[in-house]
Amino acid sequence: AVRAAVENGADLIELGIPFSDPTAEGPVIQGANLRALNGGITTDKIFDFVRELRQDVKIPMVFMTYANVVFSYDAERFISTCKEIGIDGLILPDLPYEEKDEFLPLCHTYGIDLISLIAPTSENRIAMIAKEAEGFLYIVSSLGVTGMRNEIKTDLASIVNVVRQNTDIPCAIGFGISTPEQAKKMMEKKERERRDYFKFWTDKDWSDKKNYDMALNTSVLSPDECARILLCAIDAPSA
């Protein structure tokens, strides 16, 4: 399944490590966790699986699991093994932003991105979380646990707008996206965000040279768009 996802254009693979009390998960993934554990799956077996995948899978991979999985394995041993097998990031949905220092120094030591989550209830904490985010930001689409939703009503545009005022790292939207139609709708929102961001930069005052590095270091735009922004800068009058 992982290789099929890669062959069909996936930009990143998220792998779950089973846990007995997956508090962020709905009944489908809860059941999958229990079946995996009852079937003898362990953290070490997941690590071996990633080693085998990394023989030919080159795109970024991240683990999604729970803080106790990391604690019980020994945090440094877990995170250093992530580095050794080629894992790029770690998503811990039960780790509050305020407690991330439990793992963040080790993640920095071993070059693993500790992925921050922003939920509809984050509100005045969104800017604070976004400013310190690394890798990408995981935006939770709706309240509750993972699983099917008939409709996603969260004002994601407002959340992304605050995020974009504070960081340019990529955003991923998860929770409740269960149909092709919902995925397409989320992609359309992201495309509108990208177009607005491109316009933001092309309308910049390019007599201010500090804008060059800021624009060309953004991870939101494509290389072609960055080149077009650079042309705007070259054509601009000198300060």
Image (cartoon, rainbow, N blue to C red):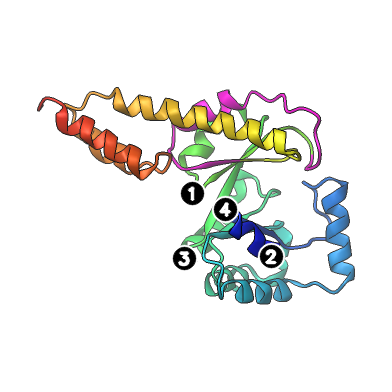
Q: Residue at x 56, y 65 (%)?
A: 87
Separation of residues labelled 3 and 4 (CA atoms): 31 Å
Q: Which residue corresponds to mark 2?
A: 71
- Which residue type does callout 2 highlight? Phe
Q: Nearer the viewer, mark 2 or mark 1?
A: 1
Residue 188 screen position, x and y as percent: 58, 30
Decide: is 37 above or below 183: below
Decide: is 1 above or below 152: below
Which label belongs to residue 190? none
Separation of residues labelled 2 and 1 (CA atoms): 21 Å
Please tell me which residue lies in front, 17 or 151: 151
Q: Residue furthest left?
A: 238
Q: How packed is label 3: few (under 14 Cα within 10 Å), some, or many (20 or more)?
A: few
Which label belongs to residue 134? 1
Helix, strand or loop status at disc 2? helix
Q: Pick whichever of labels 1 and 4 is earlier in the sequence.
A: 4
17 sits to left or right of 167: right
Q: Which residue corresponds to mark 4?
A: 9
Residue 92 visible in the current orientation = yes
Q: How packed is label 2: few (under 14 Cα within 10 Å), some, or many (20 or more)?
A: some
Q: Pick whichever of labels 3 and 4 is earlier in the sequence.
A: 4
Residue 148 falls within the magenta-colored stretch? yes
Task: For the residues labelled 3 and 4, say whether their Cβ atoms are less than 8 Å apart.
Answer: no
Q: Residue at x 53, y 39 (%)?
A: 129
Which part of the image, by quadrant, shows the N terminus? bottom right
Q: Pick whichever of labels 4 and 2 is earlier in the sequence.
A: 4
Q: How packed is label 4: few (under 14 Cα within 10 Å), some, or many (20 or more)?
A: few
- Which residue type does callout 4 highlight? Gly
- Which residue type does callout 3 highlight? Thr
Residue range in magenta is 145-172
Q: Which residue corresponds to mark 3?
A: 109
